Amino acid sequence: MMTIDLHIHSKDCSDGNLTVEELVKEAKKRNVEFMSITDHDSIDCQEKAMALARKNGIRYVYGVELNVTFSHPRYREGRSIALDFLGYQFDVENGELKEKLRKIAQYREERAVKILDKVNAVFEKEGIAKLTRKDLRKIRDSVDGVLGRPHIASYLVRKGIVRTRQEAFDRYLVKCNVPHYPLYVEEASRLVRDAGGIIVLAHPNDPHGTSLVKLTKSLHEQTAIIEKSILEYIDGVECWHSRNDALTTNHYVKFAKKHGLIMTGGSDCHQKPILMGTVKIPEHVVKQFS
């Protein structure tokens, strides 16, 4: 059976734990034959990844993961949640896409400063020494790709303020959060499609991630939401994922077939631990990519 993984994150341009070179080397070792590195809001590593994959005899498709702000009037009193969408096969030189991702990256830096300000306010109440601009520089220096809350969490662990990254989120980073760049599904879809790509709803029922679970745990309600508010903006859905159970996969495969959607899958590997290539994805997924 062919080994496929279309959802991987790198250290160079995202919050993974391995560089692009290391990822491709590991993919080769694991007999991955078709892959995509889908870094968060960044396509800076795509041409490098394509070249390395080709050199190692691995078929590669350009990828990106976009974080989108979404709301539905029937859930959470209309308050927004975040959803992730995967873009594939786009033109990496598309000017509008590159400019939007540049703005998002700049906003991430500003967001990080605001989050640290909120964390410091909590530290002051708890009698913990505040983080300084020097600390922020150290956090930035630890980031090869896009700065985000996971990097702040890791730094709090290194400082000995918390024992684990999960504790950092539970005690500080959830309540001290600042909203992501306000990218909406309509714009995300237009950006990817105008760049010649396809757009896929990522891990719609991920119990521990950015997904429709934040609105409802009912698979039937999730797909009803997609039909009403998302369907016209997507070309596919991620049916196979490392945190899917069989019920979720079967439900979304059936849903994709009903609406003629592309079906994709991946490990969502950040290499903590290395999950790349461990999700069993049927070979017919490859045939959907020209």
Image: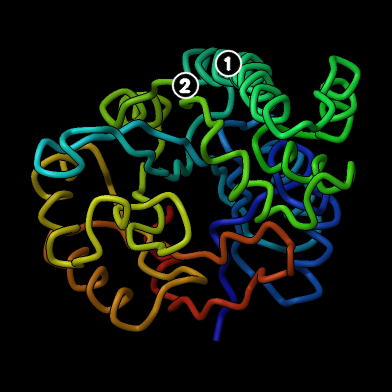
Q: Amino acid under label 2? A: Tyr
Q: Taking 153 as reference, is 25 above or below it?
A: below
Image location (x, y in percent) of residue 59: 63, 59
Residue positioned 62% across, 39% down in the render:
172
Question: Relative to 177, is 159 on the left or the right?
Answer: right
Residue positioned 80% across, 61% down in the render:
56
Image location (x, y in percent) of residue 156: 80, 41
Question: Relative to 28, is 93 on the left or the right?
Answer: left
Image location (x, y in percent) of residue 71: 23, 35
Q: Which residue is mark 2?
A: 181
Residue positioned 85% across, 56% down in the render:
22
Q: Earlier in the sequence, mark 1 or mark 2?
A: 1
Q: Taking 105 as reference, is 31 above or below it?
A: below
Q: Which residue is mark 1?
A: 107
Q: Amino acid under label 1? A: Tyr
Evaluate if marks 1 and 2 touch, with contact meaning CB atoms under 8 Å apart. yes
Image location (x, y in percent) of residue 196: 40, 31
Q: Residues within 10 Å of mark 2 (few under 14, many from 20)?
A: some
- For label 1, the SS is helix
Q: Taking 112 as reference, is 204 above or below it?
A: below
Front residue (pair 92, 138): 138
Q: Residues within 10 Å of mark 1 (few under 14, many from 20)?
A: some
- For label 2, the SS is loop
Front residue (pair 150, 242): 150
